[in-house]
Amino acid sequence: MNKADLIEVVSLSAGLPKTTAGRALEAITSSITAALEKGDDVTLVGFGTFTIKERAEREGRNPQTGAALKIPAAKLPTFRAGKLLKDAVN
């Protein structure tokens, strides 16, 4: 399912025009992004939790030359599924 498909499903299930459903989806995704940028977690009970994990700097190797290189530290968005979502999938 892509973004257009999701907008279609939301539009049909909520009885909203596609443009309104699209704006609602955009508002949700931008709100989650803004919260993660601030360092906050976003928890949707039963669905899951969006968090930021920090990965430390580490040493890696270039697979072609074998030369050592530094892989910089990074912040990664992660998602942990909630119980209701896990139960629905299984």
Image: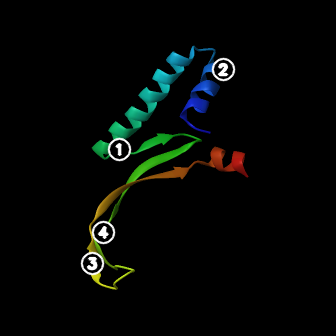
- The residue labelled by disc 1 is 36
Judge whether 78 appears above or below 7 on screen. Answer: below
| Position in image of residue 61 (x %, y %) | 34, 81
- The residue labelled by disc 3 is 69
Q: Are marks 2 and 3 in contact (CB under 8 Å)?
A: no
- The residue labelled by disc 2 is 12
| Position in image of residue 44 (x %, y %) | 51, 39
Q: Earlier in the sequence, mark 2 or mark 3?
A: 2
Q: Earlier in the sequence, mark 3 or mark 1?
A: 1
**Three-letter amino acid code at disc 2?**
Leu
Judge whether 26 appears above or below 49 on screen. Answer: above
- The residue labelled by disc 4 is 56
Q: Would you identify the image quadrant in which residue 1 lies?
A: top right
In front: label 3 or label 1: 3
Q: Earlier in the sequence, mark 2 or mark 1?
A: 2
Judge whether 51 appears above or below 32 on screen. Answer: below
